[in-house]
Amino acid sequence: MGKEVKGEIKTFLDFGKVQGGRRTSYDYYEGQDAYDLFMGSRYFKDIIFYREGEVDKVYQVEDIRDQTRKFAALVACKNYSDKLVFYEVGSSAMGVIDALEFLNKKYKELKIKDIKFFGIDNSKWMNAAAKYTHEQYNIKLWESVKEADEVKCDLFFAKGVSLMYAFEDEETMCNILKNSKISIFDYTFSLGDKIQDFVGTGLPVTYLSLDKCKKLLEREGTAFIMKPYTIKNYHHNPKDKVTCDCIYGDKEVVEKYLAELEDRIGENLNNYGDPKFIRQ
Ligand SMILES: C[S@@+](CC[C@H](N)C(=O)[O-])C[C@H]1O[C@@H](n2cnc3c(N)ncnc32)[C@H](O)[C@@H]1O
């Protein structure tokens, strides 16, 4: 293994041409601009792919599985709520709406325009993109956990590094989870006390303590299911952390969610996260 590189981390985006082996740069961005330009176009492309039914072109191979999990969870909550509420931390351009609309063409069980969508994303540009591409939907967005209203939701969702970016303490994260009927998220927990670090995107992250979260989430009638898996990108020393696919919420809703999910794609607790559910 090479020597560990130290010093300040920056995200960059370099755009240019390559001719006869020579690379020429036309434009170069750093930080949030680089992130918004690259990730923004990725999310926009996904929105268009879902709208046009070309799901095999969506950037992340597991995306349609994740969107089906959200769909199944919202269906599971239907009997408990007059108006469904979806809440995502790291909501990007709210592409969830287009994916749900896509799935609803097949399943016809939800009225996506009646769902309230709440989101937190620290990118101003991403939040504006979310609004302008979904003007006929019910959306409310914030730029940080601190400024967000307290949201009681049916489904809380978060993916990838989103929660590690957004939360620096266990209480704040667990409060959001406890305000949901069901939460579906993946997370890298610290096996000891919380750890603060940086990831490849150059942004700071916090790995909260698993034990502390477990204690805070303990409540009669709730289930907390963790399915560990290996992800190399986030950490070099997996001994002090564990990455899991997590389901937390009212036991009854969690059971209904798993039944709805199994009905649609065959995913259940025995095979949750199996690569066979993602595009190969
Ligand atoms: C891994 S992506 C989210 C995944 C995406 N919504 C999906 O379903 O595939 C992480 C998102 O978190 C946002 N983000 C980064 N730092 C954040 C922070 N401190 N608070 C909230 N969102 C943050 C990024 O702008 C990005 O949209």
Image (spheres, rainbow, N blue to C red):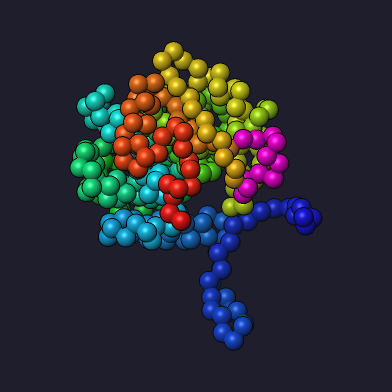
The reply to whether residue 196 is in sight is: yes
Q: In the picture shown, does residue 5 fall above or below 100?
A: below
Q: Would you say residue 237 sits in the magenta stretch? A: yes
Which residue is depicted at the point 37% across and 59% down? Answer: 56
Q: Residue furthest right?
A: 3
Which quadrant of the rendered structure holds the N terminus? bottom right
Which residue is depicted at the point 60% across and 79% down? Answer: 23
> Of residues 234 and 125, which is closer to you in this image?
234
Is 6 situated left or right of 182 in this image? right
The reply to whether residue 117 is in sight is: no
The answer to which quarter of the image holds residue 243 is top right
> Of residues 91 and 230, which is closer to you in this image?
230
Is 162 situated left or right of 130 in this image? right
Region rendered in magenta:
232-242
Q: Residue furthest bottom?
A: 20
> Of residues 113 and 59, which is closer to you in this image?
59
The answer to which quarter of the image holds residue 178 is top left
Q: Position of residue 17 (x, y in %)?
A: 54, 79
> Of residues 11 and 66, which is closer to you in this image?
66
Q: Position of residue 13 (x, y in %)?
A: 55, 64
Q: In the picture shown, does residue 230 fall above or below 247?
A: below
Q: Position of residue 106 (x, y in %)?
A: 23, 47
Which residue is depicted at the point 53% across and 60% down? Answer: 34
Q: In the picture shown, does residue 13 fall above or below 23?
A: above
Q: Position of residue 219 (x, y in %)?
A: 46, 15
Which residue is depicted at the point 26% across and 23% down? Answer: 80
The answer to which quarter of the image holds residue 190 is top right
